[in-house]
Each structure stands twice: as C-alpha cells, then as structure tokens.
C-alpha cells in the first residue's frame, strides 16, 4: 500500500498518483526506502508525505498541483548522511540545508524534466533557513508542508506508543 502519513487513502488509485506514476517507481527513488529520515520514517515516505499534501493544498487553491506533487516527491532526493556531513563539514562548505536541496535538484534533473515551478520548489524548500525567497506560491506551500510533515513524522509514532501503552 502507498499511503501518506495520517491518511487512509491508497494513493495508487487517486488522481494524485497519475501526476507521479512515471517517476515514483524509479530506482533513484527506491533507494530512499533504505534511508531513515526524521528518526522514525524513511526518506521515501517523507517525500511521499510532502508530495501528497502539497498536491492536495495546491489543488484546493487552484495552483499547479501536478508540479507540487512531482517537486514534493523529488525535494529530498539525496543519499548522504546528514549527521555525518554536519560532523565533518568545514566552515567554507555549504550547510546541509542549502546543500541537500541543490543535490536533490541535480538528481531530479537526471530522472525527469523539471519545469520552473518544480525547480523553485525543490531548491528553495528550506526557505527561510536558506535564501533566496520563493518565486511561486507553490514554493511557499512546500516550505510549510515539509515542516509540517517533519513534525508529524516525529510525533505520530511517539503518540501511537503512548496510546498503545495506555491500552495495555
Ligand atoms: Fe529537505
Ligand atoms: Fe523534506
């Protein structure tokens, strides 16, 4: 089953899926399934979460929902270990925040055509931690959804543990 966090919907049978079906099964995204992200999820699942909720919000607001779905799925397409990078980084090297979004954009461009909205969304998804500021409304949305998903990914498993321990 392919689901976003806090949603029961099987995404393969939704209009969302038709926006990403040519890229979601590719080898480059598959590799993200083996990488832990935000402590209790995988980088692949995080990208699905950001992709799906960015798509839903952009569709509601009549913005470019297809680009939002695609950029969300590709926005963290990088493979290095964040902690290792930060611990060995020299002062003149870019921060993880600005570096991973540039690497994600380069990797995304290797697997599909990226339009200007998608490019802006991927490379600026860390705003306001990184500069310059977004050019499109869709980019502002991914910056919020990315942070919202990070909080949910961290908190939901912990809340589930609490609920399970109370049930016992
Ligand atoms: Fe990111
Ligand atoms: Fe992210």
Image: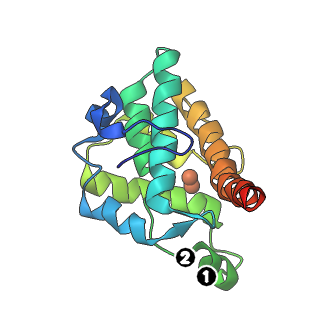
Rendering colour mode: rainbow
**What's the distance in space between the residues labelled 1 and 2, CA to CA?**
5 Å
Which element is circle 2 on? loop
Crowding around mark 2 (Cα neighbors within 10 Å: few <14, some 14 to 19, many 20+) is few
Crowding around mark 1 (Cα neighbors within 10 Å: few <14, some 14 to 19, many 20+) is few
Q: Is residue 77 above or below residue 75?
A: below
Point out which mark residue 84 bears: 1
Q: Is residue 114 above or below residue 89?
A: above
| View extreme (top): residue | 62
| View extreme (bottom): residue | 88
Q: Place residue 30 in its image quadrant.
A: bottom left
The residue that appears at 35% across and 31% down in the rendered structure is 16
Q: Nearer the viewer, residue 50 or 106?
A: 50
Number of marks in the image? 2
**Mark 2 sits near ligand 1, with its Cβ under 8 Å away:** no
Q: Residue 165: percent from the left, percent from the top?
A: 74, 62
The residue that appears at 62% across and 62% down in the rendered structure is 38
Point out which mark residue 139 bears: none
The residue that appears at 63% across and 67% down in the rendered structure is 39
* Pointer 1 with pointer 2, Cβ within 8 A: yes
Say left or right for 154 vs 16. Answer: right
Residue hosting label 2: 81
């Amino acid at each position: 089953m392919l689901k976003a966090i806090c949603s029961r919907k099987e995404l393969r049978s939704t209009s969302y899926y038709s926006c990403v079906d040519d890229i979601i099964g590719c080898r480059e995204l598959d590799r993200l399934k083996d990488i832990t992200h935000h402590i209790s999820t995988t980088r692949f699942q995080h990208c699905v979460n950001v992709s799906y909720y960015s798509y839903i919000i952009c569709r509601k607001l009549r913005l470019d929902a297809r680009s939002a779905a695609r950029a969300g799925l590709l926005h963290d397409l990088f493979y290095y270990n964040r902690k290792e990078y930060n611990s060995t980084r020299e002062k003149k090297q870019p921060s993880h925040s600005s570096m991973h979004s540039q690497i994600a954009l380069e990797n995304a461009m290797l697997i599909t055509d990226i339009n200007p909205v998608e490019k802006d969304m991927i490379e600026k998804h860390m705003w306001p931690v990184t500069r310059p500021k977004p050019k499109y409304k869709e980019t502002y949305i991914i910056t919020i959804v990315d942070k919202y998903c990070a909080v949910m990914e961290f908190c939901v498993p912990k809340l589930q543990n609490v609920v399970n321990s109370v049930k016992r």
